[in-house]
């Protein structure tokens, strides 16, 4: 039910039984599969397993309306995929931007689309990173920031604003790289022209934080693993350090924001 294919891209509606969302109900989603990647998009509809099984043949007015809504969600995604494939411009970034109405909306809309995409991929750390950057931008200039507003001059004023707030160049660089990633998506999908691109030499250049890069030797790492002073508090912080280390240097702020729900599968 509700499926199509465009070249190597498939689009179909499916019943996502991985996690209940309301009582005994599960969400209905639209999945797009391309090469080895896949992305899921919500329809807003939730059904029990029994209701999903009956949906194709039901004559209930309520479920007939639900089928129409699912079809409409499917058509929205499928039409954009079809158009992007026809123009040889398909990518998940392009699809996400088009679904968020990024062509006529704001920088913040594009941020929200990016965040939703990261959430669907289970990338909690990156999702949090973009959320923090977005909130800072909203606090600076609100949500109605059009792509054409983001000029080198605008970015420099934003940088000065953050400096006045006491932020370091390391933090400023992180926020600006988030903005650049969203703008890069817009450029790649043809929403903005090359001449509108505000980053780079002779335009706005992202400042780099100055800091020492230190590394522990394997012998020193082993000493940390083996250390035990009998204090439960020390043991707790040692475990946090080891967890961060084994996650390839996971940022401690990201580590502290992790939830059991962030675990996918095992």
Image (cartoon, helix red, strand yellow):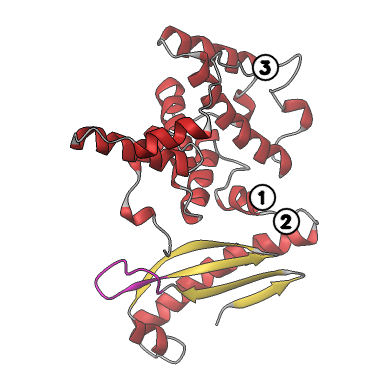
For the residue pair 17 and 50, the one nearer the viewer reads as 17
Q: Mark 2 falls on what kind of element?
A: loop
Q: Which mark is residue 90?
A: 2
**Residue denoted by label 1:** 94
Is mark 1 in CB contact (under 8 Å) with mark 2? yes
Report x, y in % for residue 4. Answer: 66, 76
Q: Is residue 4 visible?
A: yes
Q: Mark 1 falls on what kind of element?
A: helix
Which of disc 3 and disc 2 is earlier in sequence?
2
Seen as rendered, the residue at the extreme top is: 164
Tell me where the magenta segment starts and ends, as one range: 17-27
Q: Does residue 224 belong to the magenta stretch?
A: no
Distance of mark 1 from mark 3, alpha carbons? 24 Å
- Horizontal relation, residue 24 to residue 145: left or right: left
Report x, y in % for residue 166. Answer: 41, 10
Q: Residues within 10 Å of mark 3 (few under 14, many from 20)?
A: some
Residue 166 to residue 97: above or below: above
Q: Which mark is residue 204?
A: 3
Report x, y in % for residue 9. Answer: 70, 68
| Residue at figure coordinates x 66%, y 50% from the top left | 94
- Horizontal relation, residue 240 to residue 132: left or right: left
Quarter of image, res 221: top left
| Residue at figure coordinates x 35%, y 45% from the top left | 258
Q: Mostly what secondary structure, the magenta segment?
A: loop
Residue 40 to residue 52: above or below: above
Report x, y in % for residue 46. Answer: 36, 71
Distance of mark 2 from mark 3, alpha carbons? 29 Å
Residue 242 to residue 201: above or below: below
Quarter of image, res 107: top right
Q: Which mark is residue 121?
A: none
Distance of mark 1 from mark 2, alpha carbons? 6 Å
Which of disc 3 and disc 1 is earlier in sequence?
1
């Amino acid at each position: 039910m509700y499926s199509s294919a465009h070249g190597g891209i498939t689009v179909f509606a499916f019943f996502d039984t991985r996690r209940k969302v309301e009582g005994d109900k599960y969400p209905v989603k639209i999945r797009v599969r391309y090469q080895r990647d896949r992305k899921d998009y919500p329809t807003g509809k939730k059904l029990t397993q029994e209701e999903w099984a009956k949906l194709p043949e039901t004559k209930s007015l309520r479920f007939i309306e639900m089928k129409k809504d699912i079809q409409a969600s499917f058509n929205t995604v499928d039409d954009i995929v079809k158009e992007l494939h026809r123009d040889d411009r398909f990518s998940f970034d392009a699809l996400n931007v088009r679904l968020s109405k990024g062509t006529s909306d704001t920088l913040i809309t594009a941020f929200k689309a990016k965040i939703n995409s990261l959430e669907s991929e289970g990338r909690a750390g990156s999702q949090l990173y973009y959320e923090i950057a977005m909130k800072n931008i909203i606090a600076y200039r609100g949500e109605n920031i059009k792509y054409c507003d983001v000029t080198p001059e605008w970015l420099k004023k934003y940088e000065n604003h953050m400096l006045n707030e006491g932020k370091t160049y390391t933090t400023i660089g992180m926020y600006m790289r988030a903005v650049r990633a969203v703008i890069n998506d817009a450029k790649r999908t043809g929403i903005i022209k090359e001449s509108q691109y505000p980053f780079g030499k002779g335009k706005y250049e992202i400042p780099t934080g100055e800091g020492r890069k230190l590394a522990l030797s394997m012998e020193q790492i082993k000493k940390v693993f083996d250390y035990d002073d009998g204090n439960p508090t020390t043991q707790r912080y040692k475990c946090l350090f080891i967890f961060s280390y084994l996650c390839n240097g996971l940022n401690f702020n990201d580590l502290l924001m992790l939830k059991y729900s962030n675990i996918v599968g095992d």
